[in-house]
Image: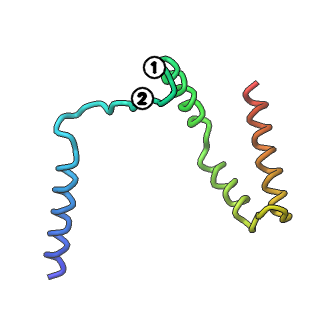
Amino acid sequence: MRTQFARQALAAIVCATLLYLPAGAQAPQREPLLGFSDEAAASQRQLEQRFDSLLKADNLREWMKFIAAHPHHVGSPHGKGVAEFIAEKFCAAATLRS
């Protein structure tokens, strides 16, 4: 009985997925960026791709561990440490940029 239910559920998921997919394999259309001309939007997307390529999952994981290690509400000792940590990261990024 359970196996039959599992098969029916799987079949329903597969059918729903197939119905959702477009019939033809078309390249996704990019949404226009509000407030940007076409040329500026292309430049902005390039900049964002460059930014994304600089992000490292291991760095983000370590940073999040530090930031979330203790409560860091305004005025707390860890809050000051988090603020200094983030300021240090911004300064390092600015140094890399120049």
Q: Secondary structure at mark 1?
A: helix
State left or right for residue 85 relative to residue 38.
right
For the residues labelled 1 and 2, the Cα–Cα distance comes to 8 Å
The picture places residue 98, in percent across and down from the top left corner, at 76, 24
Asked if 80 appears above or below 26 in the picture, the reply is below
Q: Residue, x 73% and y 59% (percent of image)?
A: 66
At label 1, which amino acid type do we have? Asp
State left or right for residue 16 relative to residue 41.
left
Q: How many marks?
A: 2
The picture places residue 33, in percent across and down from the top left corner, at 47, 30
Q: Residue, x 77% and y 64% (percent of image)?
A: 73
- Residue that lies at the very extreme toward the bottom in this rendered image: 1
Task: Give the image quarter of residue 9.
Answer: bottom left
State left or right for residue 79 relative to residue 33.
right
| Disc nearer the start of the sequence (1/2) | 2
Q: Secondary structure at mark 2?
A: loop
Q: Residue, x 22% and y 48% (percent of image)?
A: 20
The picture places residue 8, in percent across and down from the top left corner, at 14, 69
At label 2, which amino acid type do we have? Pro
- Rendered image: mark on residue 32: 2
Quarter that holds the N terminus = bottom left
- Rendered image: mark on residue 38: 1
Disc 1 and disc 2 in contact, CB within 8 angstroms: yes
The picture places residue 87, in percent across and down from the top left corner, at 80, 45
Task: Categorize mark 2 by other alpha carbons within 10 Å: few (<14), some (14-19), many (20+).
Answer: few
Task: Give the image quarter of residue 21.
Answer: top left
Task: Categorize mark 1 by other alpha carbons within 10 Å: few (<14), some (14-19), many (20+).
Answer: few
- Residue that lies at the very extreme toward the top in this rendered image: 39
Q: Residue, x 22% and y 53% (percent of image)?
A: 17
Asked if 26 appears above or below 16 in the picture, the reply is above
Residue closer to the observer: 60 or 94: 94
